[in-house]
Image (cartoon, helix red, strand yellow):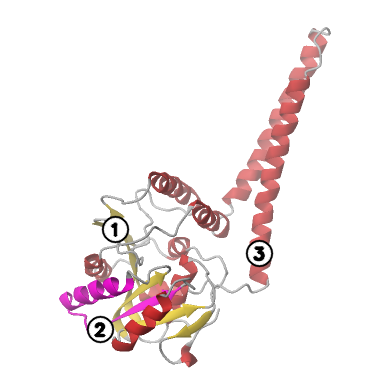
Amino acid sequence: MPKPTNPPTCKLSIIVPVYRSEAILPKLVELIHDEMEKEGLAHDFELMLVNDCSPDNSWQVIRSLAATRPWIKGVSLRRNFGQHNAIMAGLNHAGGEFIVLMDDDLQHPPHAIGDLMRALQEGYDVCYTRYLNRQHAAWKKLGSQFNDWVATHLLGKPKGLYLSSFKGLRREIATEVIRYDGPYAYLDGLILDVTRAITTIDIEHGARHEGEGNYNLSRSIGLWMKMATSFSVLPLRLATYAGFAIAALSLVMILFVVAQKLLHPELPAGWASLIATVLFIGGIQTLCIGMVGEYLGRTYLKLNHKPQFVVGSTTWSRENDVQT
C-alpha cells in the first residue's frame, strides 16, 4: 500500500468524502477555490473528492469538475465503504504538506480552512474544530455527548476535545494513520494513537445546503462500535469485571437465601425471584458472549484481508490507483 513518504507535491490537500451530493458539489468547489485564492494558495493546493459509491450522479459531477480544474482530483470507490474508509482512501492519495478533512454538505465553512492550516503551522500535529452553534437534530447531539464520554474513557481522549469531522493534520500524522490497513477504520482513534499535540479552533456550524444528513441511527451505532471494539479492550475488561461482580453477588444471595430458610422454614420458595435472577444472569452472559464475538469477528475479517477500500477509477492515470 503506497504511503505518502515522498516529498509533498503541494502545500495543502483538502479531502472530502462524497455521498449523495451532486447538487452541492459545484457550490462547494467554488467556495473552496475562492478561499484558496484569498489565502494565496490558488496554485498550491489540491481538492480530493472521494466518491463513496454514491447512488446519484456525484461521480459524473466530480469528473466534469475535474476536467476543467486541474487542482481537483476525483477518486471513485467500487462500493460504499463508509465515511472513514473513504477518507483513508483520500489520505493514501493526498500529496499536501498539510491535510484538511471536511464534509460535503457545506456545514463546514471553507473560510475556516486557512485557520486550520495556520494552527498546524504553529507546530500542532492536529487541529479540530469546535462548533459554536451545532445545526444537528437533538438525537445527534445526545449521541455526540455519549460518544464524547465513551471516547474519553476508551481512547484516552483529552476532556473538552470535540472529535469533529472537520479537522486538519500534518502530513507526518497522515503517514502514520494510513499504516492501519484493517477494514474498520476509525480516524479519530487512529489520530489519538499517534499524537496528543492537538489544538482546536471555534467555527460557526452552517445549515446543510440541501437534502438530509447521511448518518442515521444505525450508522451512528456502527461508528460507535468501530471505536469501542477496534481501538480498546476495555469492553472485554468490563465484561470480565461484570462476571466477577455477578459471581460475588450470586454468592451473597445464596448465603442470604440459605440463612432465610434456616431461620424461617415456613417461607415458600421464591419462583419470581428465581426467574428474575436467571434472566438477569442470562442477559449478562449473552452480552459478554456477544462482545467477545464482535472482537473475534473483526479479527477474522482482518485475517482474511477484508479490504479497507477498493478504488474503481480516478480522474487521473489509473496506474496510480490504490487498492487496500
* Mark 3 element type: helix
Count neighbours of disc 2 (C-alpha within 10 A) and say few if under 14, some if 14 to 19, many if 20 or more. Answer: some
Measured from the top left, where is residue 180 in percent x and y?
52, 71
Give the mark nearer the N terminus: 3 vs 1.
Answer: 1
Provide the residue span drawn in magenta. Answer: 25-51
Q: Is residue 23 above or below residue 66?
A: above
Counting from the top left corner in percent of width and height, residue 261 is at: 81, 13
Look at label 1 and name its amino acid.
Thr
What residue sits 33% from the left and 62% below the top?
A: 210
| Residue that numbered label 1 is attached to | 200
Instruction: Choose between 232 and 29: the one closer to the eye.
Output: 29
Q: Quadrant of residue 47?
A: bottom left
Mark 3 is surrounded, within 10 Å at the Cα level, by few (under 14), some (14 to 19) or many (20 or more) other residues, namely some
Between 228 and 54, the residue placed more toward the observer is 54
Along the polypeptide, which appears first: circle 1 or circle 2?
2
The amino acid type found where label 3 is placed reads Thr
Are circles 2 and 3 on residues that touch, CB within 8 Å?
Answer: no
Which residue is labeled 2 in the image? Answer: 44
Q: Residue at x 24, y 56 (%)?
A: 204
Residue drawn at the location 49% of the way across and 92% of the way down: 319
Residue 237, labelled with which disc? none
In this view, the residue in front, 147 or 74, is 74
Determine the secondary structure under disc 1: strand
